[in-house]
Image (cartoon, rainbow, N blue to C red):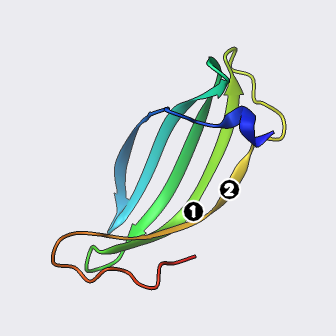
Amino acid sequence: MWGLFNAGNNFCIGAWTKVGPRSYDLVHTFYLFDGANAIGVSIEKSHLVVSRDGNRFSGTWNQDNYDLYENLISGTHFDGTIRGTRIAPGLEYPFPLPL
């Protein structure tokens, strides 16, 4: 079933808003494809907290997939935790990479 939701050469569009000190809510959407045809839309939402130095974040996310008629596709709700490290010139590279 995962192949059904392969984003392939897809793109996403999204927005974020500050909801507290170093705390942000994000939302982004992208199309779902079955081969060459769009069959739905995925909506992913995240709540992230950025470290005091601005170089790391952690938070939660969830994703729901809808067909092109705005119906939730059964069995396609996902959620979890997320974390990341900023990569930029002059910063130490984050080895070992987080799993």
Residue at 35 percent across and 49 percent down: it is: 17
Identify the mark at residue 3; answer none if there is no mark. none
Q: Residue furthest left?
A: 90
Q: In this picture, is 60 found above or below 78?
A: below
**Residue pointed to by mark 2:** 79
In the visual, does 59 lie left or right of 75?
left
User: For numbered disc 1, what is the local secondary structure?
Assistant: strand
Occupied quadrant, residue 5: top right
Q: Mark 2: which amino acid? A: Asp
Occupied quadrant, residue 85: bottom left
**Residue pointed to by mark 1:** 60
Cβ atoms under marks 1 and 2 closer than 8 Å: yes
User: In the rendered structure, which disc, 1 or 2, sits on the residue that comes first in sequence?
Assistant: 1
In the visual, does 21 lie left or right of 1?
left
In the visual, does 71 lie left or right of 43?
right
Tell me if mark 2 has few (under 14), some (14-19) or many (20+) residues whose alpha carbon lies within 10 angstroms of its own.
Answer: few
Q: How many marks?
A: 2
Residue nearest the observer in this picture, 17 or 67: 67
Q: Mark 1: which amino acid? A: Thr
The quadrant the C terminus occupies is bottom right
State the image coordinates of residue 58 (x, y, percent, origin top left): 47, 71
Instruction: Give the alpha-carbon distance from disc 1 to disc 2, as whole Å.
Output: 7 Å
State the image coordinates of residue 94 (x, y, percent, origin top left): 37, 80
Q: In this picture, is 62 found above or below 85?
A: above
User: For numbered disc 2, what is the local secondary structure?
Assistant: strand
Residue at 75 percent across and 22 percent down: it is: 71
State the image coordinates of residue 34 (x, y, percent, origin top left): 70, 24
The quadrant the N terminus occupies is top right
Tell me if mark 1 has few (under 14), some (14-19) or many (20+) residues whose alpha carbon lies within 10 angstroms of its own.
Answer: some
Residue at 83 percent across and 41 percent down: it is: 75
Residue at 44 percent across and 33 percent down: it is: 11
